[in-house]
Image (tube, rainbow, N blue to C red):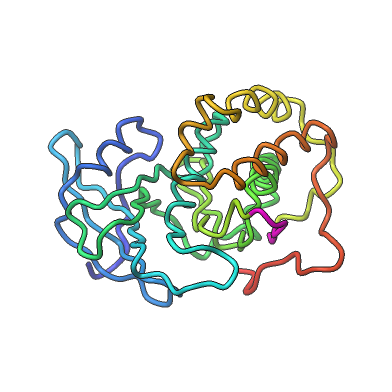
């Protein structure tokens, strides 16, 4: 693959997760400069109208971290499933897969063709409401690495959040560039979505079942607690005192 493709499967197509899980890999290349092994794969599926592309993050290609357990790719899948449980299309379709992958089990995430020079910092004025949604999502998911380049503009006005592997930790680790709306009241429609979600995060609930195996019991407990805090506090958080609140680098 000589360059990033300009077209791929529509990530809003509900068939994409099943295509990612079963498509044949026909080509691939390692994405340079990533801290872990990351690959861009070309995929072919008999039911898909065209070639598709996916970002592959194998578990065995991860560098160990002192504060996160191995298999960060599972948190990529969890972020997608959590966004889906909220009814928010924030995270591109992401699946866990082992079959047919050179480096074994990992995550496959639908590739988003985009202008990589256009980051959160260029998008925030035009898409302020979308960024508020991302700010709320990242608070609940406890995202420790929301860089400006992790918000992509896809087809039309759809924004997507990528690189969510450093999320859902039990310790407070929120690090993000999206502090523009700190202290603002959370819009009523977002509060309603969170309120509807909370019962399904309880044991036996649909959201809890979808996250089982991807997050620990302790992480699930803290996820529920953060969702409850959204309703209790009603405002987006401010940068916490006493620890680093921004990721580095910012983009």
Q: Position of residue 223 (x, y in %)?
A: 65, 42
Give the magenta part as a residue range.
Answer: 170-177
Pick the front one: 23 or 204: 204
Kindly indicate the quadrant of the structure image that contains residue 86: top right
Q: Residue at x 76, y 31 (%)?
A: 187
Pick the front one: 126 or 32: 32
Q: Position of residue 191 (x, y in %)?
A: 73, 28
Residue 173: within the magenta?
yes
Residue 14: within the magenta?
no
Position of residue 235 relative to residue 200, above or below, is below
Position of residue 132 relative to residue 193, above or below, is below
Kindly indicate the quadrant of the structure image that contains residue 233: top right
- Split into 4 quadrants, where in the image is the N terminus? bottom left
Position of residue 193 relative to residue 242, above or below, is above
Q: Position of residue 75 (x, y in %)?
A: 49, 52
Q: Position of residue 169 (x, y in %)?
A: 62, 55
Residue 115 left/right relative to 198? left
Q: Residue at x 79, y 35 (%)?
A: 186
Q: Main secondary structure of the magenta part?
A: loop
- Split into 4 quadrants, where in the image is the C terminus? bottom right
Pick the front one: 28 or 158: 28
Residue 183 left/right relative to 134? right
Toward the bottom, the furthest residue is: 33
Pick the front one: 35 or 15: 35
């Amino acid at each position: 693959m000589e360059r990033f493709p300009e077209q791929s499967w529509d990530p809003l197509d509900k068939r994409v997760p099943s295509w990612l899980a079963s498509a044949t890999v026909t080509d691939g290349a390692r994405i340079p400069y990533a801290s872990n092994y990351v690959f861009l794969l070309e995929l072919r599926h008999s039911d898909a109208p065209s070639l598709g592309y996916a970002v592959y993050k194998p578990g065995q290609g991860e560098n160990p971290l002192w504060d996160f357990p191995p298999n960060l790719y599972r948190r990529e899948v969890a972020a997608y499933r959590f966004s889906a449980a909220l009814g928010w299309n924030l995270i591109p379709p992401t699946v866990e897969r082992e079959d047919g992958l050179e480096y074994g089990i990992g995550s496959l995430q639908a590739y988003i063709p985009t202008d990589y020079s256009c980051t959160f910092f260029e998008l925030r004025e035009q898409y302020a409401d979308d960024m508020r949604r991302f700010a709320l999502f990242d608070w609940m998911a406890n995202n420790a690495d929301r860089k400006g380049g992790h918000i992509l503009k896809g087809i039309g006005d759809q924004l997507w959040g990528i690189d969510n592997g450093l999320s859902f930790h039990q310790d407070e680790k929120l690090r993000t560039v999206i502090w523009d709306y700190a202290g603002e009241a959370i819009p009523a429609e977002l509060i309603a979505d969170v309120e509807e979600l909370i019962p399904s995060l309880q044991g036996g609930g649909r959201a809890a079942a979808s996250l089982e195996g991807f997050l620990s019991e302790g992480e699930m407990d803290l996820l529920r607690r953060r969702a409850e805090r959204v309703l209790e506090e009603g405002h987006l958080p401010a940068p916490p005192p006493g620890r680093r609140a921004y990721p580095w680098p910012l983009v």
